[in-house]
Image (spheres, rainbow, N blue to C red):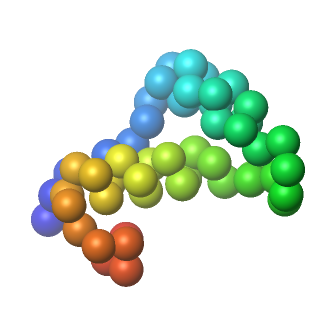
Amino acid sequence: MGVRVALSDAEWARSAPLVSALTSRGPKGDDNRRFIEATLWILRTCAPWRHLP
């Protein structure tokens, strides 16, 4: 089984303002960090979205 890709707190602190700036319309994403980590996992493993852990 592969290593889980997780953002450190420092990495998330730098990226969070970029992600929250994009959510001006629609519902607010309370789990943006989880979504970013899932996206990084997809990119790293080349797995389809349905295989998310």
Residue 25, compared with residue 49, is above or below; it is: above
Q: Is residue 28 visible?
A: yes
Q: Looking at the image, which residue is at 31% across and 58% down?
A: 42
Q: Position of residue 32 (x, y in %)?
A: 63, 48
Q: Is residue 24 left or right of residue 21?
A: right
Closer to the camera in the image, 1 or 37: 37
Q: Position of residue 9 (x, y in %)?
A: 53, 27
Q: Is residue 22 left or right of residue 11?
A: right
Residue 30, compared with residue 18, is above or below; it is: below
Residue 7, compared with residue 25, is above or below; it is: above
Q: Is residue 51 left or right of residue 7?
A: left
Q: Looking at the image, which residue is at 74% across and 32% down?
A: 21
Q: Looking at the image, which residue is at 56% across and 19% down?
A: 14
Q: Position of residue 27 (x, y in %)?
A: 84, 59
Closer to the camera in the image, 9 or 27: 27
Q: Is residue 4 visible?
A: no
Residue 43, compared with residue 17, is above or below; it is: below
Which quadrant would the N terminus be assigned to in this image?
bottom left
Q: Position of residue 16 (x, y in %)?
A: 64, 30
Which quadrant would the C terminus be assigned to in this image?
bottom left
Q: Looking at the image, which residue is at 44% across and 30% down?
A: 8
